[in-house]
Image (cartoon, grey):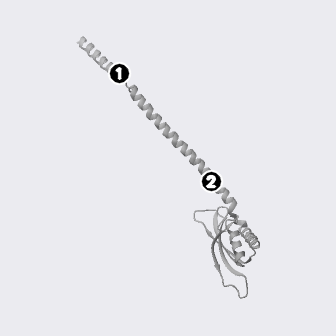
Amino acid sequence: MAARVVLGLLLAANLAAAVVAFKPFGGSADDLRKEQSQLQDQLAAAQARLAISKKLVGKVNVASREGTDFLDRYVVDRRVASSTISEELNRMAKAAGVLLGQTGYSFQQIEGSDTLQMWTINVAVGGNYQSLMKFVNLVDKSSRFLIIESMQTAAPQQNSQVQPVQFKLDTFVRATAGSLDE
């Protein structure tokens, strides 16, 4: 009986040795190389995604900075918008040689923005064709981001070289959050 137990133990030990010799538990050398290759591929893919993410973060930062610079340069603060726009229109009218008539302002909230409004400016302008074209050119190149929405001519006065035109201009103004309802 003891010999049988010893033979069984030797057989089990031989089987265990055979399993270890022919199929190691950590995998064969080929299996380990394949796993290493897969892990290196995963690492390269993760590093590529990281590089793309870093580029995107850089682009978002540049876009944010450029957006802020654009707003600072072209959008008027609401507290001084009326006087600034009036001053700009007067300057352009004088440079173009046209006469400014009555000016009216209206505004609309911009959906999704707490700090921006679109202002519509209705202004009557009178002048000859060349001076009106110069005025349009100056409005188009204004540093105040004025957009000509429409121009409507009225019947010229009899015996007059002055052509009256009604301009509808749009621009944007900025205010602090919550102060747009004032």
> Residue 141: x percent and y percent?
69, 66
Q: Residue furthest top?
A: 3
How many numbered marks does the figure carry? 2
The front one of 94 and 128 is 128
- Name which residue type carries label 2: Ser
Residue 121 in which image quadrant: bottom right
First in sequence: mark 2 or mark 1?
1
| 3D distance between C-alphas at marks 2 and 1 | 61 Å
In the rendered image, residue 168, in percent from the top left (x then y), is placed at: 65, 74
Confirm or deny contact between disc 2 and disc 1 (CB under 8 A).
Answer: no
Look at the image and tell me in which quarter the C terminus lies. Answer: bottom right
- Mark 1 crowdedness (10 Å alpha carbons): few <14, some 14-19, many ≥20: few
| Mark 2 Cα-neighbour bin, 10 Å: few <14, some 14–19, many ≥20 | few
Which image quadrant: the N terminus? top left
Image: 24 above or below 149:
above
| Residue matched to label 2 | 64
Tell me the number on the disc at residue 10. none
Residue 166 against residue 116 in the figure, above or below? below
Q: Secondary structure at mark 1?
A: helix
Q: Residue 74's spot in the image, x, y percent?
A: 68, 62
Residue at 74%, 70% (x, y): give it: 92
Residue bearing the label numbered 1: 20
